[in-house]
Structures are given as C-alpha cells and as structure tokens.
Amino acid sequence: MHRVTDTGDGPQSVRILMRPVTAENALQMAALTRDFHPWQVVPQAAKKAGQPSLVLHSAWISGLVSTALEQMASSGRVIQWSIKYHGSAYLGERLVLEACVVQDAKAEPAVKILFRVLGPARKLVAEGEALINEAV
C-alpha cells in the first residue's frame, strides 16, 4: 500500500493506493477461504463467463480495507467497521481506497470515517464506514 495524504478534498482525507493482486495471491486466498470458485482461480473460466480476468474474492477487498483502517488509526483502535460491495474487482487492477473523517456527534468520543474502494476509471467497488477510538 502507498499512502497519499492531503488530497485537497478536506483537512482530514486520505487516499491509499493498493498494490495489484497476483494470480498466486488469488490462489492463496482461495485456499485460505476454501472458496475455489472457478471465476476466482481459473482464468479460462473467468474469460468464458465474460469477466475481463480473475475476479478478486471479496475477502481481499475486506482485508485491504481493514489494513488501511488500522494504518489510519495509528495509535488508536478500529472499534467497528462495515462494508457494502457494489461491483467486482479483478486480478491486476490497482485499487484505491479514499477515506475522510466526518463529524458525527453520535460517534463521539470515537472518530467516524467514511470510505470507498475504487477500481479503474473510478468504478465503485465498495463503500463503508468505520469508528476509530482516537483522532486520525
């Protein structure tokens, strides 16, 4: 991951570029989750189904988001987070996580973060929110 801060979108916004997933990584995730869906591990099956390449398991996206949130928490702790998926991400794509701190009196003393995961051409892959117990 490569963290880019001060995006100009606000005083507490961050953009994190995620490294592309390899075919070996995809196979490791299939073994870890015991989910060997052909579109996720067999390139020919993905192509035959009309996919541009292997479909990334949603656990990859969740893992990348979790890691990014932990980095943003710094000395704090991620209390909870949720994610909603809107589309697929594919092998070799560079994903971007954009996040910003929002004011929410209901969340205090925790800090509320809204985030989204974008694929190529800023295609929305997922979005969600998190609570962190210290300011980021």
Image: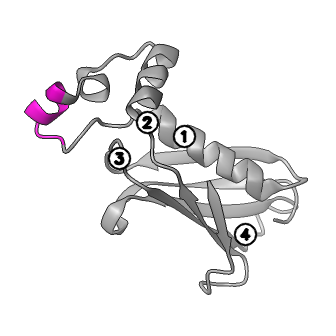
Q: Amino acid at mark 2?
A: Ser
Of labels 3 and 2, the one closer to you: 3
Disc nearer the start of the sequence (1/3): 1
Q: Between residues 10 and 133, which one lies in front from this camera angle?
A: 10
Image coordinates for residue 106, horizontal then vertical, percent:
76, 63
The residue to which callout 4 is attached is 104
Residue 123 visible to an observer of this rendering: no
On-image quarter of the C terminus: bottom right
Residue where numbered disc 3 is placed: 89
Residue drawn where x is 46% and y is 14% of the image? 31
Say which amino acid is labelled 4.
Asp
Look at mark 2 in the image and give the residue it sits on. Answer: 58
Sequence-first disc among 3 and 2: 2
- Label 3, label 2: how many angstroms apart (C-alpha)? 8 Å
Callout 3: SS: loop
At mark 1, the secondary structure is helix
Q: Is disc 1 surrounded by few (<14), some (14 to 19) or many (20+) residues within 10 Å?
A: some
Mark 1 lies on residue: 62
Front position among marks 4 and 3: 3
SS at badge 4: loop
- Residue 101 in the image: above or below residue 76: below
Q: Residue at x 75, y 53 (%)?
A: 71
Q: Counting residues from the N terminus, which is met first, the one under dot 1 or under dot 4?
A: 1
* SS majority, magenta: helix
25 up-or-down from 3: above or below: above
Answer yes or no: do the residues labelled 1 and 2 have beta carbons within 8 Å? Answer: yes
